[in-house]
Amino acid sequence: MEFIDLKRQRARLEPELSQRIEAVLAHQSFIQGPEVAELETALGAFSGASHVITCANGTDALQVALMALEIGPGDAVFVPSFTYTATAEAILLLGATPVFVEVDEASFNVDLAAAEAEIAAVVDEGRLRAAALITVDLFGAPVDGEAARALCDRRGLKHISDAAQSFGGRLDGRRVGTLADITTTSFFPAKPLGCYGDGGALFTEDAELAARMRSICQHGKGAAKYDVVRVGLNSRLDTLQAAILLPKLAIFGDEVERRHQVAQAYTERLLGYVRTPLPPAAPDDRSAWAQYTVQIEAGQLGGRDAVQARLKAAGVPSAVYYPRPMHRQPAYAHLARRPLPVSDGLCERVLSLPMHPYLTDAEIDQVCAALIGADTGALAPRSLETAA
Ligand SMILES: *Cc1c(COP(=O)(O)O)cnc(C)c1O
């Protein structure tokens, strides 16, 4: 069994994938070829975002967003401690200061009340300007954009949404891409919408920000070809990757629905054995389910290490995302301002199970039986309706 089975997806998408790749090899516009603009239009239609700019990867997307907001030395950028390294890295590369914030145990996402308290503390100290909040839709579930917006408006911050794991998700009738001043995503192969290499994109409703971000991605280009109006980067999505993403995007809505069903099937089988991730709050909300992540207490079912060993023995891959919070990383620990016990605790308990749209019910049974330490036949899925 694969943790993420891209081969099954490829089998579904042939021959379109090969035809798209062939077309690029024939026209040879490898940089900024027609597929790039076609993809940006399609991503806008899918997400509802007014402006879409593709770039080289999700880490660059974060850096470009921060550069467009002119964030640099003397600026504090608030980020959850329980996240992937890239979120903090982009801030530090620009000379700004990441301020690590506690997360919520059930949603894995930033605790907005803790963020507000930390913003107030930084403002009181008067050393740094409270410039921006980066929320991270960890494992695919979108952060409450309205609540984040209200907090940022109250405190005069910009809101960036790191949606590397949540593109394809939706909340309160709005799709990821429209829930922040700037949304960034990644097309790393293992993300819900992945290409066959590195890729990323930025989304905004603000035309001026969009123009600035497009310029930054092209060496700070001005109106004429060799005008340089700001310091920028070389951050572009290859035409080949855009060509690969186009047929994948065409089936992506369907794949997100299937991920949602797989998550429900897991939860029905695992409820009562381990702490399962939160289901969507409203029937129409969707997580992109980049990961299906359970929490295993010390000693529960033998403890996390024993569960992982049992899964491995049954041929089931699993992963710990993430074993260490940002405020304890050797490179960032000097920035820690206070203990963050929820982030610490999650790192001890989380375990992510195989998750992709092509998991069969039999495979889901196999994973759950190995996790619980039971025979597949002993599994009695509970209806989520009666369990809730
Ligand atoms: C994957 C990821 C990134 C970085 O994306 P790349 O395309 O690998 O640079 C940033 N933030 C989060 C939360 C991610 O999961």
Image (spheres, helix red, strand yellow):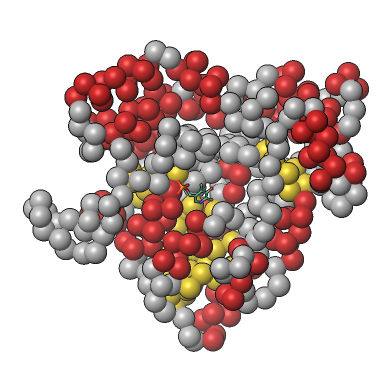
In the image, residue 242 lies at what x, y percent?
33, 32
Identity of the residue drawn at 61% across and 68% down: 330
Identity of the residue drawn at 52% across and 38% down: 191
Identity of the residue drawn at 30% across and 38% down: 238
Q: Which image quadrant is residue 305 in?
A: top right
Q: Which image quadrant is residue 19 in?
A: top left
Identity of the residue drawn at 89% across and 32% down: 373
In the image, residue 375 lies at what x, y percent?
89, 23
In the image, residue 123 lies at what x, y percent?
51, 81
Residue 84 appearing in the image: yes
In the image, residue 372 lies at what x, y percent?
86, 33
Considering the image in quadrants, where does the N terminus appear? top right
Residue projecting furthest to the top: 15
Residue 159 appearing in the image: no
Up the image or down, 225 lies above or below 175; here it is below
Query: Foreground: 161 or 375?
Result: 375
Query: Foreground: 50 or 9?
Result: 9
Answer left or right for 43 relative to 11: left
- Number of numbered tags placed on the structure image: 0
Considering the image in quadrants, where does the C terminus appear? top right
Up the image or down, 187 lies above or below 154; here it is above
Answer left or right for 213 relative to 127: left
